[in-house]
Image (spheres, grey):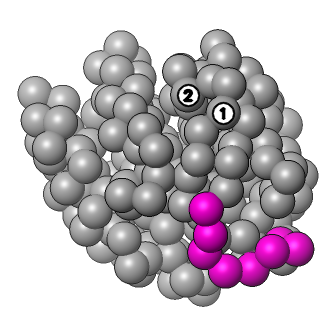
Amino acid sequence: MTRIVVIDLHGQFTHLERRALRDLGVDTEIVPADAPADEVDADGIVLSGGPDMDRVGNAPDYLDLDVPVFGICLGMQLIALERGGAVGGGDYGGYADVDIEIVDDDDPLVGSLAPETRVWASHADEVKELPDGFVRTATSDVCGIEAMADVDADHYGVQWHPEVAHTERGEEVFENFVSICESA
């Protein structure tokens, strides 16, 4: 059975990320961000959303494990910063429905959502500059980089929250990540 852990970056929806995976039949648990990376046994890792970078603990170390990583909101921003990208304040702050446009329908995480999907997202902070090796896979009129991927490294990120009911086809994003983990 596929095992995917959710690293708790103290987001309000972390339990919903675990539930989405559990509902897909995945062996999953929530792991505290201060758990040492070498003690995490998983076929894939979800870096949860969260309030700020000051509480990410050992989460950067999980990027060096040889398993796929999926960052959600703060998790995506963490991946971007750790891999040399830039994060900054968004022009639009709070949570809202956003229409995203998939710009890379070959992306194994979000490509199946093409051409457009309505999502629930916060844009208080967002990825402003992609790290080397990453491509932008989704955009919106609110945020230039709504999703990103480095397929060679199996690192993926979305600015929005696929785990909440307000996001259309959110379960599909988790199904796609499970498939990525199973074929890695």
Task: Find residue 133 and report its horizontal and vertical position in percent.
Answer: 79, 30
- Please tell me the numbered disc located at residue 113: 2
Please name the residue that numbered disc 1 is placed on: 116
> Could you say which quadrant of the image residue 27 lies in?
top left
Question: Is 132 in the magenta?
Answer: no
Question: Is 93 in the magenta?
Answer: yes
- In the image: residue 75, left or right of residue 174: right
Residue type at tag 2: Leu
> Magenta part mainly helix, strand or loop?
loop
Query: Pointer 1: residues within 10 angstroms few (<14), some, or many (20+)?
Result: some
Task: Indicate the secondary structure of the residue bearing disc 2.
Answer: helix
Would you place residue 66 above or below residue 89 in this image? above
Magenta stretch: give its range. 90-97
> Can residue 76 be seen by looking at this rendering?
no
Residue type at tag 1: Glu
> Can residue 146 be seen by looking at this rendering?
yes
> Could you say which quadrant of the image residue 25 lies in?
top left
Task: Find residue 107 and report its horizontal and vertical position in percent.
Answer: 62, 21
| Residue located 63% across and 24% down the image | 114
Q: Are marks 2 and 1 in contact (CB under 8 Å)?
A: yes
Label 2 to label 1, Cα distance in Å? 7 Å
| Residue located 85% across and 52% down the image | 141
